[in-house]
């Protein structure tokens, strides 16, 4: 187990390293990084200062070292627009993103799990096809399209829900559904296939042979095991949701980190863009590591085979 | 050399022959295929089909509703936008943007991914390690976020979008192709080619590549939908196809401002176009996946 953890942590650190090298190279290779990192209209002295800070006259690996150490010490630069450290901005917005992701996750599980179970119990029936259509739409429809249609219907036409901004739970409903639909589709598909697998197992057959009512077999015996992979995916997806909500947050003007990224693009505020990307990637690498370790802890076969 | 490779190449060509007869198989998604063909047709002949210039409008005729609404006219079937450009014409030329960006980006991603996947799977060792570790690291970034980051660095243009999407999505190809190559490597015909003294480059080109093409095609079809959504999202966020080019995502971003005052046609029509194209590509891809490549069913 210890060996497994050490190796897995090693891989994650390697991934983080490669990610930082990638970002470093893209920023450096595509031209003079000072044009990206210095505000438009900066004085020549400012540009010269920035050059020295990055050591642009020094070998590239020294430049990388300076870049990496500034990141590790939490110095991700200053926002041009807000004139505060970008990390501060990031943590101001993070709670909003968490809130949106949490509600979207609850919605996606409330939709995905029951419809996945229904589809698995009635394979090939009406509910199966309905579920397939729902998940195909969820995976195919662009989020800004879903969002705008919801606004058109519930805000413009019916006038029930606020079209943008933050506040109460009403503000959250449409963005959370828009974000959650895609994930509901993924959760539904996984619930269905996992449920099908479990329903075919010996112990479920035994439970049926014992004469247990079908509802108890499915709701208790089968569901408990079928949900394990779904819960794992949901855990990873929660972190993914925080980082992919840029379109949803833009459509609904929700002040999370996706919106921060959008502002970063529109105000040409490159340090903000860089910060959101770096932290997003790191967050996902860490959650994958945690899930792997948790799995290896629960299931010895995983740590023995690899 | 030619004596040993000819029969093997013939065996490898068999899947390609099977591909040609696909449309005769049962369950072929006819409507999605026709929709895609129609969009392709519109994209090719946009110059003849569009009634107006997609980039030039007349401010005197702005915000005209579609023909069947009060105040609409047959002159502008689907209405006009905030600078008086004809929505139908912009949709028609937008099909060209989506098709060109979608297809070439998938080709770029597929090309890089298939090449690196084959190299990684067949050569193994440190080559495999380097490529797969980069794939792992890049996959950690959500595709859209990664694409936004790259677009913020290089600036928006059609060509840049293609390169960016190719650069973001090749990792998925590399992973699937590598898996296929690993199992192909163990097959008789590849081992025989090794025994016959074929060079590694020749084996990869003549014996491995034709056998991973099927998976690559399936992935490409599934990827087409994803790439088009990403392109539209980038354009929607203002880092994709630059205005005044008529891209569907861009049209929706423009139309969004008029949504609250009731100019619904500016967002609904381009949205329907994107939806139809992506749904069709996904339905076709799903079907191809099951028919062409049973190994990919769990994808």
Image (cartoon, grey):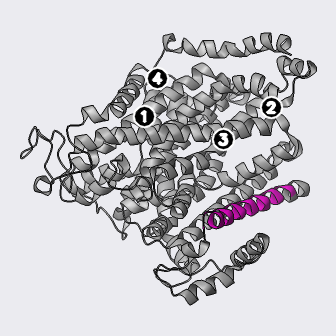
Secondary structure mostly taken by the magenta-highlighted segment of the chain? helix
Specify few, some or many for label 2: CA neighbours under 10 Å numbering under 14, 14-19, or 20 or more. Answer: some
Residue marked by disc 2 = B182
- Between disc 4 and disc 1, the foreground one is 1
Task: Confirm or deny contact between disc 4 and disc 1 (CB under 8 A).
Answer: no
Q: What is the spatial separation of the Cα atoms under label 4 and label 1, in whole angstroms?
A: 22 Å
User: Is the same chain shared between marks 4 and 2?
Assistant: no
Q: Earlier in the sequence, mark 3 or mark 2?
A: 3
Residue marked by disc 4 = A125
Task: Work out whether A34 lies above or below B192.
Answer: below
Q: Chain of mark 1?
A: B
Specify few, some or many for label 1: CA neighbours under 10 Å numbering under 14, 14-19, or 20 or more. Answer: many
Apparent side of residue A262 relative to residue A38 in the rendered image (left or right):
left
Q: Chain of mark 3?
A: B
Q: Which residues are magenta?
A: A7-31
Which element is circle 3 on?
A: helix
The one of B268 and B169 positioned closer to us in this rendering: B169
Which element is circle 2 on?
A: helix
Q: Earlier in the sequence, mark 2 or mark 1?
A: 2
Task: Confirm or deny contact between disc 4 and disc 2 (CB under 8 A).
Answer: no
What residue is shown at x 85% (from left), y 13% (from top)? Answer: B4
Q: What is the spatial separation of the Cα atoms under label 3 and label 2, in whole angstroms?
A: 18 Å
Specify few, some or many for label 4: CA neighbours under 10 Å numbering under 14, 14-19, or 20 or more. Answer: few
Residue marked by disc 3 = B112
User: Is the same chain shared between marks 2 and 1?
Assistant: yes
Q: What is the spatial separation of the Cα atoms under label 3 and label 1, in whole angstroms?
A: 26 Å
What residue is shown at x 50% (from left), y 36% (from top)? Answer: B103
Residue marked by disc 1 = B279
């Amino acid at each position: 187990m210890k060996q497994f953890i050490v190796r897995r942590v090693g891989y994650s650190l390697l991934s983080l390293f490669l990610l930082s090298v990638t970002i470093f190279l893209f920023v450096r290779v595509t031209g003079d990084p000072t044009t990206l990192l210095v505000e438009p209209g900066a004085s020549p002295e400012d540009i010269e200062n920035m050059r020295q800070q990055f050591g642009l006259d020094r070998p590239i690996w020294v430049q990388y070292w300076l870049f990496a150490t500034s990141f590790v010490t939490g110095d991700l630069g200053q926002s041009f627009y807000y004139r505060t450290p970008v990390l501060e901005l990031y943590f101001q917005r993070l709670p909003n993103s968490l809130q949106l992701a949490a509600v979207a996750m609850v919605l996606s599980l409330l939709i995905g799990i029951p419809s996945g179970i229904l589809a698995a119990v009635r394979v090939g029936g009406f509910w199966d096809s309905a579920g397939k259509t729902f998940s195909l739409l969820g995976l195919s429809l662009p989020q800004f399209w879903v969002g705008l249609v919801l606004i058109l219907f519930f805000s413009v036409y019916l006038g029930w829900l606020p079209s943008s901004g933050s506040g109460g739970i009403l503000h959250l409903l449409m963005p959370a559904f828009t974000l959650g639909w895609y994930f509901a589709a993924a959760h539904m598909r996984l619930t269905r296939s996992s449920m099908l697998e479990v329903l075919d197992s010996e112990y479920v057959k035994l439970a049926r042979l014992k004469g247990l009512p079908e509802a108890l077999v499915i709701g208790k015996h089968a569901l408990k095991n079928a949900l394990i992979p779904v819960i794992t995916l949901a855990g990873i997806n929660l972190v993914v949701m925080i980082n992919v909500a840029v379109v949803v947050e833009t459509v609904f003007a929700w002040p999370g980190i996706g919106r921060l990224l959008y502002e970063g693009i529109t105000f040409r505020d490159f340090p903000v863009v860089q910060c959101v990307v770096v932290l997003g990637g790191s967050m996902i690498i860490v959650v994958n590591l945690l899930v792997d370790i948790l799995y290896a802890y629960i299931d010895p076969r995983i740590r023995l085979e690899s | 050399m030619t004596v040993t490779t000819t029969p093997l190449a013939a065996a490898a060509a068999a899947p390609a022959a099977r591909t040609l007869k696909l449309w005769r198989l049962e369950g072929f998604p006819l409507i999605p295929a026709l929709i895609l063909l129609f969009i392709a047709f519109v994209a090719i002949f946009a110059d003849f089909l569009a009634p107006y210039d997609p980039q030039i409008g007349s401010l005197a005729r702005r915000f005209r509703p579609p023909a069947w609404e009060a105040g609409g006219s047959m002159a502008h079937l689907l209405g006009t936008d905030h600078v008086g450009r004809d929505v139908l014409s912009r949709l028609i030329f937008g099909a060209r943007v989506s098709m060109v960006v979608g297809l070439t980006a998938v080709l770029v991603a597929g090309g890089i991914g298939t090449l690196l996947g084959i190299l990684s799977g067949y050569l193994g060792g440190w080559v495999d390690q380097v490529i797969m570790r980069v794939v792992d690291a890049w996959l950690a970034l959500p595709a859209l976020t990664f694409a936004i980051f790259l677009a913020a660095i290089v600036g928006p243009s059609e060509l840049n979008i293609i390169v960016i999407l190719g650069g973001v999505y090749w990792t998925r190809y590399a992973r699937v192709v590598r898996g296929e190559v690993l199992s192909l490597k163990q097959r008789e015909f590849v081992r025989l080619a090794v025994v016959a003294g074929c060079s590694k480059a020749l084996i990869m080109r003549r014996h491995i590549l034709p056998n991973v093409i099927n998976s690559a095609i399936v992935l490409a079809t599934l990827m087409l939908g994803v790439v088009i959504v990403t392109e539209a999202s980038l354009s929607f966020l203002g880092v994709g196809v630059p205005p005044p080019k008529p891209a569907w995502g861009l049209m929706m971003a423009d139309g969004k401002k008029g949504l609250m005052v009731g100019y619904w046609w500016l967002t609904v029509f381009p949205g329907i176009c994107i939806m139809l194209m992506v749904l069709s590509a996904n339905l076709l891809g799903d079907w191809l996946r099951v028919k062409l490549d049973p190994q990919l069913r769990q994808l």
